[in-house]
Image (tube, grey):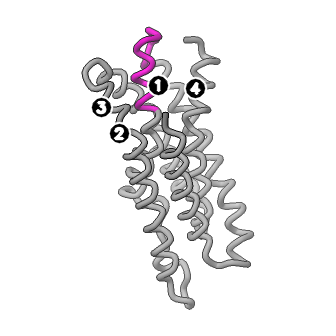
Amino acid sequence: MDILTAASLGLGLSADAFAVSVSSGLSMKYARWHKAIKIALFFGGFQMLMPILGWGLSLTWRSSIEAYDQWIAFLLLVAIGAKTIREALGDDDDNPSEQACNPADTRMLTGLAIATSIDALAAGVGLTVVNTPILQVAGVIGLITFAVCLAGVFLGKSFGCRLYCHVGKVEIVGGVILILLGFKMLLTAG
């Protein structure tokens, strides 16, 4: 597989992580580089590791992975989206960001990164039939996802700053995006 094909695969696989990164940026009161980098590292790292894992497990677990991947992603995204909305609605009016969902929380990022990289796991399974150097392809996928997600956090933050002045509950928008993304994954599953 050439570098252009691997980069195209990386862009395709990073779309869900980009949407979640924008959602994370929406819910951030202040855009901090260390939080944005942490978010991008989680998504890029999982997008890099999952094809390797899928490639390694493909010989014995292929049918099991393909049978449940969309359900795992759906449940994780809907649960995290609902939690984000619930916490946003539970805020008091005096300090709307005090109880807000922290988009850079390690546990939350782990769940989101797993949910958005299930398709990368399936891609790794598919890459076994192409006979491609999996480490190189996975590295390209991870780097593309990192860059796209870093940009997504700041893009979401720029919209969030504008919305926060008018709405005050942009975390709800982020939660809705996660839930819709979960339903999209479930409905478009092969």
Rounded to the nearest angstrom, the CA distance separating label 4 from label 2 is: 22 Å
| Quarter of the picture holding the N terminus | top right
Mark in the foreground, 4 or 3: 3
**First-in-chain label (1 vs 2):** 2
| Residue 32 circle label | none
Describe the element under mark 4 as helix, strand or loop.
helix
- Residue 69 point in image, percent of width and height: 39, 39
Residue 131 in the magenta stretch? The answer is yes
Residue on which disc 1 sits: 138
**First-in-chain label (4 vs 2):** 4
For badge 3, the amino acid type reads: Ser
* Direction left: furthest residue: 60
Towards the viewer: 136 or 55: 55
Residue on which disc 4 sits: 9
The crowd level at tag 2 (other Cα within 10 Å; few <14, some 14-19, many 20+) is few
Quadrant of res 5: top right
**First-in-chain label (3 vs 1):** 3
Residue on which disc 2 sits: 68
Rounded to the nearest angstrom, the CA distance separating label 4 from label 3 is: 23 Å
What residue is rendered at 36% in x and 21% in y? 55
Describe the element under mark 3 as helix, strand or loop.
helix
What residue is rendered at 51% in x and 88% in y? 92
**In this image, 2 relative to 189: left or right?**
right
Specify the segment rendered in magenta. Answer: 120-135
What residue is rendered at 39% in x and 53% in y? 75
